[in-house]
Image: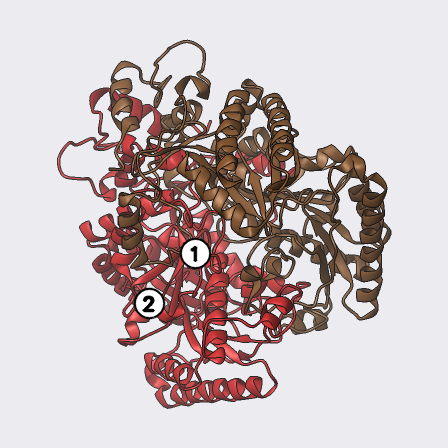
Chain colours: A brown, B red
């Protein structure tokens, strides 16, 4: 039952030590802050097929309340540790999907358990403020020591939001507001603007657009969904906007063998972007902003070169469009740099950078010019959640203290080399191994084979996710070490040997 | 700073008592669970003008990071108790706005402090799952004992979301999906549907619409914003949809003197709704759903009769539109019933009911027919937050244990009668006192006078909010008792005497 190794240990620990130096750990030490590895399990351990009987029972129970078609299994988060997710049937899996890439430093990290039992943080947990009007005293400090401490180049301003979709929705709104004020030449709307916007009509609600890319994923609310083009199931039956959609480069692998072809492909896509900007301006729906992921994640882990992104950023500037880099999935260190766009090596990479998932709170950074000119334009009741800022600040401490970006680079190299080896060994099954840091992927010969591999791996205690039509995406937490990579590669090899 | 009566007391309490029977209270007792009143302050206490020097300093600091135009002041949530919000300059105010109506049982309720220090809940605080795929073991039980235990009539299914806007966005998507499957006569999209939706075009992204009401507020993301029509500042410069907007009845007060006029007004609005549904069908943008608040809150606390809502619900059924009641602000007990729509006295009041704010988690209830036919259609990474479900379950326990709905009815009567008295005493200043439970409002002769009253009341330790063009809205927590009402009315009378 959802019980409670942690619970019991915590009580014991409390009795010994008010400050919980090692709550949740199996090996208690009062020395320096523990790293996660000291508390972790030593490997997967499977007791039943997955979903096991208890998961099936709970799925049936939840099925009375919700659609459960996407439920994989139910989890025992109390017993999960580091890279290991434990399910309610006692199966322990090496988690390389991490709640759709949203767990930064593994399960039950001792530093987070300690943080959440610090009585000074109790008020934050029970009193959720309306951050836009009545923030808590420590809000500026918390934001400074968390989000501002990892702000992308050129950005000193940040707005928190509750989730990824809301982050992008509000980033789009910020771009529209900025664009219209630029068109006006001032910040004072006309009477006509004010009157027409109340009834959804132009010029108050202008015919502006956001340019997005085929294969991109930016969220599921109606504004962001109009820029999402990864899978039909996300978009079907929902009204949308007539906004331009550019092709994202389809690179050929291995990259070093297709240098010229890939350069041409990227040039073709950039040309198409410019054509679309001109065309949409001509048809009265100017492009206020361009939105793109540094690596298209949901759409199939599609990469492009730093040169492509530099070219795109220049096109945006040339045509007066804001440039929005969506780092909801790529942000937080998993590519080996804190932000994936840092790999482009630009001083002025973007006007807006949005985030969520591993950052635990949603939100977006922006340049000063992209700040709405008046209050209540970018606004809602909660505007994020201070509890998440609190956890994020500690997660960033752990990332620094445990040198996790270095670890990601180290593990990422071993992982990618391992994938190269496997695709050489199973050429009929695997292809196009690719990645940055541990943000890796590989293609499988068919959708069915991909899905079969995912299930077989799970049966052997490896939890993976798919993306695109026939890719497997690797999304471990930042605490995924070299020895976890080797463990994964060994088991994955066994799975592939069965498939072959 | 931001320190910590609670923190210090908690440590003391922990040393005495592992289970924190009364953490955060000034009077410790090991007897039955404490109610909030035992811990509360005995009245407002103002030390500086508001915002005081410390608030101004923090506003300047935050101004380097965000637009701070909407910041009222900074708060010391640690020292806040029950109905009293304490700011960082030591001012203590009776809070009748409660974080834009989002605090259900006051600040630092002992039951919530106890909950958050229970070590069994620690894992929930540090491991946020992707609820749609890997829910925790206790998820079905927590949902059952929280949201399902207060489900609106006719609804046994609920989907959680992170905020109010996302709740309504997803409710709209559910209505579109339902409507299109009804049009198709089956759940299998055509190849053309699948191909066109990827490029934002009909029929895959169909030209469907949601009918909303002038003065309504349903959120700020682009789908919900197309149905929001309360203030221009919310909508200006953001592209929108060509969706029908009906008039909301403008009732004349006192209601008993204008029975016939108000009936006619409501009949006129209903007629207009039917006309719009026919007209939008004819122009190829059929109305898939109607969305309405039981009391238009942000738009000025506009009420309509139960008969109006019954008529509207019948029109929706007659024309095959889903009927979505947005209880984001009205839900949670503040009108004297848990859901405001319960005042209509209908067995089948709605197809969808959305919530957020006082429910702590966003989400929506729906009938079985409104459940998306396939997984991943209504989906996102987090789909809510189990931490909030945990707190909500305990909030509902407190509401039951402390009979808070009865209290709301009692306080609400005293409040509304007090407002009637005041408008009789200040006829040139106040008019149209109205309300249900403590969800009350009153109009002021002008925008400027309204804003001046709000500031003067704040200087005397009463925190209120405005709504509409010139209304004051009263949004106390459910723990706002008769003696709080009297305290408010006395101080408010002093303010009005100054204004007159």
Image position, residue A462 (x, y; %): 45, 34
Q: Residue furthest top?
A: A31
The answer to which of A335 and A287 lies nearer the viewer is A335
Q: Is residue A241 left or right of residue B360?
A: right
Q: Residue B63 is drawn in which quadrant?
A: top right
* Callout 2 crowding tier (Cα within 10 Å): few <14, some 14–19, many ≥20: many
Question: At 48% across and 47% down in the image, what residue appears?
Answer: A130
Q: Which residue is mark 1?
A: B495
Image position, residue A143 (x, y; %): 56, 34
| Residue A280 in sight in this render | yes
Image position, residue B453 (x, y; %): 48, 58
Q: Name the chain under label 2.
A: B
Q: Secondary structure at mark 1?
A: helix
Q: Which mark is residue B340?
A: 2
The answer to which of B286 and A288 lies nearer the viewer is B286
Q: Is residue A242 left or right of residue A397?
A: right
Question: At 59% across and 74% down in the image, what residue appears?
Answer: B206
Q: Residue furthest left?
A: B31
Image position, residue B399 (x, y; %): 24, 52
A416 above or below B433? above
Mark 2 or mark 1: which is in front? Answer: 2
Q: Secondary structure at mark 2?
A: helix
A116 above or below B254? above
């Amino acid at each position: 039952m959802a019980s409670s190794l942690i619970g019991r240990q915590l009580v014991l620990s409390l009795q010994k030590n008010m400050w919980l130096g090692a709550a949740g750990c199996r090996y208690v030490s009062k020395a320096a802050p523990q790293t996660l590895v000291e508390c972790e399990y030593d490997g997967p351990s499977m007791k039943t097929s997955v979903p096991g009987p208890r998961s099936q029972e709970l799925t049936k129970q939840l099925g009375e309340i919700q659609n459960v078609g996407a439920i994989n299994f139910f989890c025992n988060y109390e017993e999960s540790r580091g890279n290991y997710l434990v399910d309610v049937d006692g199966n322990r899996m090496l988690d390389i999907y991490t709640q759709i890439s949203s767990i930064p430093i593994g399960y039950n990290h001792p530093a987070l358990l300690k943080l959440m039992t610090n009585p000074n943080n109790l008020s934050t947990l029970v009193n959720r403020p309306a951050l836009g009007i009545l923030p808590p005293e420590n809000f500026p400090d918390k934001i400074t020591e968390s989000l501002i401490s990892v702000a992308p180049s050129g950005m000193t301003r940040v707005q928190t939001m509750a989730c990824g979709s809301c982050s992008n929705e509000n980033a789009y709104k910020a771009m529209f507001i900025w664009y219209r004020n630029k068109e006006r030449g001032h910040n004072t709307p006309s009477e006509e603007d004010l009157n027409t916007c109340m009834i959804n009509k132009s010029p108050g609600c202008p015919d502006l657009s956001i340019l997005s890319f085929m294969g991109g994923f930016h969220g599921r609310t109606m504004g962001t969904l109009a820029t999402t083009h990864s899978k039909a199931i996300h978009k079907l039956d929902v009204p949308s906007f007539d906004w331009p959609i550019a092709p994202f480069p389809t690179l050929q692998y291995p990259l070093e063998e297709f240098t010229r072809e890939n350069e041409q492909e990227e040039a073709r896509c950039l040309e198409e972007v410019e054509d679309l900007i001109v065309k949409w301006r001509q048809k009265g729906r100017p492009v206020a902003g361009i939105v793109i992921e540094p690596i298209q994640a949901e759409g199939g882990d599609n990469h492009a070169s730093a040169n492509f992104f530099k070219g795109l950023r220049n096109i945006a500037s040339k045509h007066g469009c804001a440039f929005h880099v969506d780092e909801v999935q790529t942000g937080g260190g998993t590519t080996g740099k804190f932000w994936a766009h840092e790999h482009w090596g630009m001083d002025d990479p973007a006007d807006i950078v949005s985030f969520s998932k591993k950052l635990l709170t949603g939100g977006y950074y922006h340049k000063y010019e992209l700040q709405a000119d008046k209050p209540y334009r970018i606004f809602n009741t909660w505007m994020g959640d201070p509890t998440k800022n609190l956890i994020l600040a500690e997660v960033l401490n752990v990332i620094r203290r445990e040198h996790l970006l270095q670890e990601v680079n180290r593990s990422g190299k071993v992982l990618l080399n391992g994938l190269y080896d496997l695709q050489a060994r199973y050429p009929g099954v695997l292809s196009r191994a690719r990645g940055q840091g541990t943000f890796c992927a590989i293609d499988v010969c068919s959708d069915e084979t991909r899905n079969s591999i995912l299930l077989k791996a799970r049966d052997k205690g490896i939890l993976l996710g798919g993306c695109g039509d026939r890719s497997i995406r690797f999304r471990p937490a930042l605490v995924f070490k070299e020895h976890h990579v080797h463990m994964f590669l060994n088991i994955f090899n066994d799975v592939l040997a069965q498939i072959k």
